[in-house]
Image (cartoon, rainbow, N blue to C red):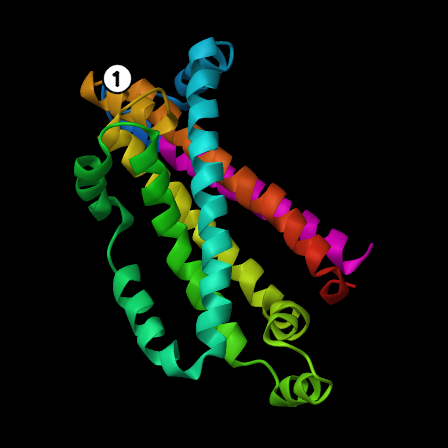
Amino acid sequence: MSNTQSTGVASKRAYVAAIAIILFFWQVAAWFLPDFLMPDVPVALQRLWEELNSGDFYEGLGNSMSRLGIGYGAALFFGIILGLVGGTLDLVRSTLKAAIIILQSIPSIAWVPLFLILMGFGNTPIIVVVAIGAFFPTALSVMNATESVEKVHISAARVMGASKLQMLKRVYFPAVTPELITGAQLAFGNAWRALISAEMIVGFSAGLGKSLAYSGEIADMTGVMTNILVIAILAAVIDQVILERIKHRLLRYQYL
């Protein structure tokens, strides 16, 4: 078995074990708490099965995934550009990095009231909040990686007459790809949390966050725990199945 396969199998086993432990402690808590405060695991799984056979569930899932895709994609695009530009321009590097660090410290959800006033209720403020959550870690990881590019590679490219655009495409971008992918995974976690939080607050249309908030408003603890379970499982699947596969494909030479 190759190193890639061994790593993948070990990762899957770790996630299965983690899920089993979480469900075990959930069930233990349910034994000691009243049903209206903490439902049994089988009850929540039964509700989840019912939701999976409901059209409303897939409508909310589709809305959330589209908001995540647009916001996360935009954050990666602009984060890579800003990171490369900021990392290669000495005049603005320090100031730009300081600004990113400062703005990154602000929780994404704190921007929701501002964007609701500026943009009104709708998909746009949620998408922008998701993009902000993913943008800063992406830009910072690319900028840090750009600064660490070997000087000899830069000098060699300049001697060969490479233009600034060619330097970005042929020297900097390949060099920062490993850090970029790691930063993209970190950015996904931020984007996912920003998405759920913004949907809970804005509550514009069907979505995972709105469903969770509604269950809480009507004191439906089975619905709350079911939504939390769905949110956790989806995050794990996207991160460990989709993003990890992309990571291994792009960096396959490191997993031989």
Residue 31 appears in the figure? no
Residue under label 1: 220
State the image coordinates of residue 26 (x, y, percent, origin top left). Answer: 37, 32
* In the image: residue 36, left or right of residue 58: left
Give residue 128's position: percent from left, percent from top.
34, 42
Q: Position of residue 25 (x, y in %)?
A: 38, 36
Quick one: 164 or 40, which is closer to the camera? 164
Magenta span: 1-27
Quadrant in the rendering for residue 140 = bottom left
Q: Is residue 102 above or below residue 153?
A: above
Principal secondary structure, stretch drawn in magenta: helix
Is 124 part of what is drawn in magenta?
Answer: no
Q: Which quadrant, please, contains the N terminus?
A: bottom right
Q: Position of residue 137 (x, y in %)?
A: 41, 60
Foreground residue among 157 and 202: 157
Name the quadrant containing residue 125: top left
